[in-house]
């Protein structure tokens, strides 16, 4: 049984697979506690519901099987604090590709077809996870965050070459901040591949909210006084 915050059918709004039909499974729990977290309902005491649903992997896979999803994304919170082996097995049994979105700060248990690693300064990724990542997603909450994360990944052995995609995403509460947007633009112009400008397209569409099983939004949204 896994603690599940929400599950919903939508499209992937970010990264190399953006725009494709995807099923999302969001687990409870995260020890990282980013002060701008846009999924604070998975860990923040002000937002955690009174009852947490615990669901068997086979039940989750059966829900996915009723859709036309091209792949399933396991996210959080921080999904890697859970053993995801049985869930990935159940999803592969029904023919699903399985993607993971993780900070990379915890050992990964499960068989994944694609790993998006999004490092967080509060708990940086493990070297083994950096080596396993198919793409990196850097959340840029201030102009100097790009250099900060590139340095951290390089120190952990990341080969930031054209074989890896490195997305530079403005943190959503900063998505209209010209200092952040200009820093991303100038970095990409100065460095080229593998850096790409990222965006959370699903938020413009409000796509996730069209599935009634998606949980009410609980973003901290750049308000450190609400975080840890």
Image (cartoon, rainbow, N blue to C red):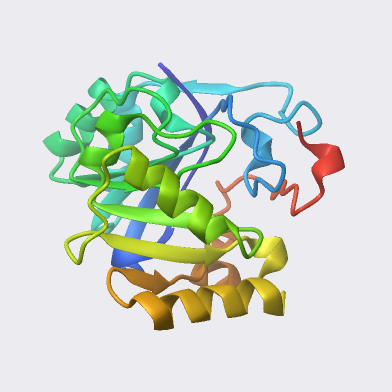
Q: Does residue 103 appear left or right of residue 110 in this picture?
A: right
Q: Is residue 38 above or below residue 194?
A: above
The quarter of the image holding the C terminus is top right
x 26%, y 40%: residue: 157
In the image, 129 versus 18, the foreground residue is 129
Q: Position of residue 113 (x, y in %)?
A: 18, 45
Residue 84 position by quadrant: top left
Q: Position of residue 39 (x, y in %)?
A: 62, 44
Q: Position of residue 121 (x, y in %)?
A: 56, 40
In the image, 201 versus 136, the foreground residue is 136
Q: Position of residue 78 (x, y in %)?
A: 49, 32
Q: Does residue 124 appear left or right of residue 132 in this picture?
A: right
As drawn, the residue found furthest toward the bottom would be: 189
How many numbered marks are there? 0
Is residue 176 something one can see in this rendering? no
Q: Is residue 57 above or below residue 7?
A: above
Residue 167 position by quadrant: bottom left
As drawn, the residue found furthest toward the right would be: 225
In the image, 168 versus 226, the foreground residue is 168
In the image, 80 versus 98, the foreground residue is 80
x 72%, y 30%: residue: 44
x 69%, y 79%: residue: 178
Is residue 62 something one can see in this rendering? yes
x 28%, y 63%: residue: 165
The quarter of the image holding the N terminus is top left
């Amino acid at each position: 049984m896994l603690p599940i915050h929400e599950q919903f059918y939508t499209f992937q709004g970010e990264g190399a697979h953006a725009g494709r039909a995807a099923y999302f499974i969001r687990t409870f729990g995260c020890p990282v506690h980013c002060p701008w977290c846009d999924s604070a309902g998975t860990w923040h005491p002000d937002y955690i519901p009174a009852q947490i649903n615990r669901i068997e992997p086979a039940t989750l896979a059966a829900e996915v099987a009723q859709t036309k999803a091209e792949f399933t994304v396991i996210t959080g919170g921080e999904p890697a604090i859970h053993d995801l082996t049985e869930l990935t097995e159940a999803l592969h049994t029904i023919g699903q590709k399985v993607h993971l979105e993780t900070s990379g700060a915890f050992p990964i248990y499960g068989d994944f077809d694609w790993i998006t690693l999004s490092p967080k300064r509060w708990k940086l990724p493990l070297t083994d996870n950096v080596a396993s990542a198919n793409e990196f997603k850097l959340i840029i909450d201030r102009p100097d965050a790009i250099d900060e994360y590139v340095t951290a990944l390089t120190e952990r052995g990341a080969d930031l070459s054209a074989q890896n995609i490195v997305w530079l995403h403005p943190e959503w509460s900063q998505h209209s901040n010209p200092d952040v947007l200009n820093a991303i633009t100038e970095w990409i112009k100065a460095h080229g591949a593998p850096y790409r400008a990222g965006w959370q397209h699903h938020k413009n569409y409000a796509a996730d909210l069209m599935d009634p099983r998606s949980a009410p939004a609980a973003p901290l949204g750049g308000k450190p006084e609400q975080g840890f």
